[in-house]
Image (spheres, helix red, strand yellow):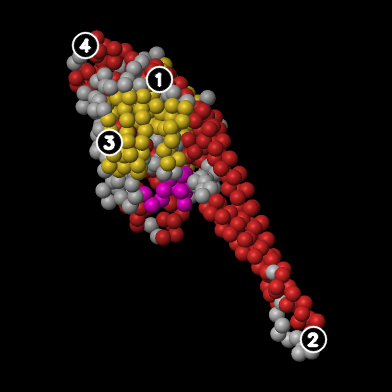
């Protein structure tokens, strides 16, 4: 069994350019990874494969039953209640695969992001589709739950399409990877490590070829100038203008050169060089290498002129019946703190209370874990309302995160990753003293995660970072706040 996309193209209504154009690809049984920068059209292509949207041109065949597990887990899956009421074999299997607790079905709105994602994946697997599309399934998940998801997806025996920036998951599950490279889509063998290594090698080789072609063009230009100058000198030498009427020897010498054709050699060589140069320039123009940035987005932020940027008294933080016991907490102007803990342990509750404790004199920047439609519209309105210079600064950050700034100005079909980049850029250009980032790597491509990490390491102000990305946490933070279960409650401990 396989799914074939043949010459498919799609353009969003009102968009200046297509999301993708003339893509042909085959998805066999097993998992195929879909990898590329935010906004390159990965999710749109997957929705075409799942028959959720119809391409402007091209075909999708054969007609297979598909399920699509989207990035956004804030809305409950349509089959949630079906799974909740099914205690047969398939229902029990889906619950067991994702370790779903019985009460989760009835309090979806109060679940953590990771718990909602597990329910979302359970419902998708419960449908037993022929084609299963997973769009960033490990967003919001702690390390233990990522392993649960990995095992659950490995049990699927149909056609799996995995859109992810989770390198471990891609390497563990997929046998081939569809990479979006600029406006070109190419299928490559293996998971992220193997496919990206091949791309990097090919890119380096292409850059060497282009540099070699550029050097050849410059060499030929210099040679062409030399030969053109030589041809001009030879033309001057064979001119009889200025010779005296009685200088018969000079006139005879010029005449013999014209008859023998020797005087035209330099001119013919100059003409031949022009053709060689045109050919070399044509070859150079054909050796294009798509522009990539070096994972650097600049330096931002200032150190607050205060004794602290946040302070919580020892207390028990509550929301409904849920609570987290915290000791007295201080964040100094240059502290870099990471907040960790399993899904559902109250990290976002702690973040909200920390932000409420920030003094009015401290400029705080906050990028939330989940972005509501209202916050999305607010970010886009803010971009359009900014002065030209400030807007250009924001868009330059987005560009250095390998996303097209023009799509943000268009604003009609932003991916979650593009939106997160915009929100981050708008916060950074204000030079905050305190950065609060709740799962900032969600939806970001790998290059953008590396760029974010480089910026945070050198940030001069305070940081409160909530993340399950251990590599990011180790690079950025000096202090860890960890929430753990203590008897029948949750407790935050400073490590």
| Callouts 3 and 2 close, C-beta under 8 Å | no
- Secondary structure beneath label 4: loop
Tag shown at residue 247: 2
Image position of 205 with respect to 107: above or below:
below
Distance of label 2 from label 4 (alpha carbons) = 116 Å
Q: Earlier in the sequence, mark 3 or mark 4?
A: 3
Tag shown at residue 112: none
| Callouts 1 and 2 close, C-beta under 8 Å | no
Image position of 431 with respect to 312: above or below:
below
> In terms of depth relative to the viewer, which is nearer, 31 or 479?
31
Distance of label 1 from label 2 (alpha carbons) = 96 Å
**Left or right of 359 in this view: 278:** right
Magenta-colored span? 396-407
- Asked if residue 332 is among those painted magenta in the image, a careful observer would answer no
Distance of label 3 from label 4 (alpha carbons) = 39 Å
**Residue that lies at the very extreme toward the top in this rendered image:** 89
Picture residue at 31% right of the left edge, 39% below the top: 8
Closest to the camera, between mark 1 and mark 2, is 2
Distance of label 3 from label 2 (alpha carbons) = 83 Å
Q: Is residue 248 visible?
A: yes
Distance of label 1 from label 4 (alpha carbons) = 24 Å
**Left or right of 250 in this view: 393:** left
Q: Earlier in the sequence, mark 1 or mark 2?
A: 1
Residue under label 4: 87
Residue under label 1: 150
């Amino acid at each position: 069994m396989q799914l074939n996309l043949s010459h498919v193209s799609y353009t969003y209504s009102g968009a200046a350019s297509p999301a993708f154009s003339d893509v042909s690809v085959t998805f066999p049984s097993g998992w195929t990874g879909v990898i590329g920068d935010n906004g390159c059209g990965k999710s749109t292509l997957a929705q075409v494969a799942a028959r959720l949207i119809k391409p402007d041109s091209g075909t999708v065949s054969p007609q297979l039953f598909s399920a699509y597990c989207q990035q956004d887990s804030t809305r409950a899956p349509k089959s949630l209640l079906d799974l909740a009421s099914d205690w047969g074999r398939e229902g029990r299997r889906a619950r067991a695969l994702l370790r779903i607790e019985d009460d989760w079905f009835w309090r979806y709105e109060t679940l953590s992001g990771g718990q909602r994602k597990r329910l979302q994946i359970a419902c998708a697997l419960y449908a037993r589709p022929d084609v299963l599309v997973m769009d960033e399934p490990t967003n919001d998940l702690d390390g233990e739950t990522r392993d649960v998801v990995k095992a659950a997806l490995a049990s699927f025996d149909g056609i799996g399409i995995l859109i992810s920036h989770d390198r471990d998951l891609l390497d563990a599950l997929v046998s081939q990877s569809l990479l979006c490279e600029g406006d070109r889509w190419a299928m490559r063998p293996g998971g992220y490590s193997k496919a990206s290594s091949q791309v990097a090698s090919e890119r380096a080789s292409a850059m060497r070829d282009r540099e070699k072609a550029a050097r050849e063009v410059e060499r030929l230009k210099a040679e062409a100038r030399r030969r053109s100058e030589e041809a001009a000198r030879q033309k001057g030498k064979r001119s009889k203008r200025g010779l005296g009427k009685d200088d018969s020897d000079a006139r005879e010498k010029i005449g013999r050169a014209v008859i023998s054709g020797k005087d035209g050699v330099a001119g013919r060589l100059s003409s031949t060089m022009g053709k060689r140069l045109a050919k070399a320039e044509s070859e150079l123009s054909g050796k294009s290498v798509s522009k990539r940035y070096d994972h650097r987005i600049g330096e931002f932020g200032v150190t607050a002129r205060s004794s602290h940027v946040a302070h919580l008294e020892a207390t028990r933080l509550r929301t409904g019946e849920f609570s987290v016991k915290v000791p007295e907490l201080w964040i100094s102007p240059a502290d870099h703190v990471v907040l960790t803990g399993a899904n559902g342990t109250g990290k976002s509750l702690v973040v909200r209370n920390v932000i409420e404790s920030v003094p009015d004199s401290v400029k705080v920047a906050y990028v939330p874990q989940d972005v509501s439609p209202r916050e999305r519209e607010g970010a886009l309105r803010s971009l359009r309302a900014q002065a030209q210079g400030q807007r250009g600064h924001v868009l330059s950050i987005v560009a250095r995160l390998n996303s097209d700034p023009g799509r943000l100005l268009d604003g009609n079909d932003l991916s979650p990753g593009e939106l997160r980049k915009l929100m981050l850029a708008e916060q950074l250009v204000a030079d905050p003293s305190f950065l609060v980032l709740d799962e900032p790597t969600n939806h970001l491509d790998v290059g953008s995660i590396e760029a974010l990490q480089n910026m945070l390491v050198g940030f001069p102000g305070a940081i409160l970072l909530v993340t399950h990305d251990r590599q990011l946490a180790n690079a950025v933070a000096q202090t860890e706040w960890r929430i753990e279960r203590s008897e029948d409650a949750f407790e935050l401990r400073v490590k």
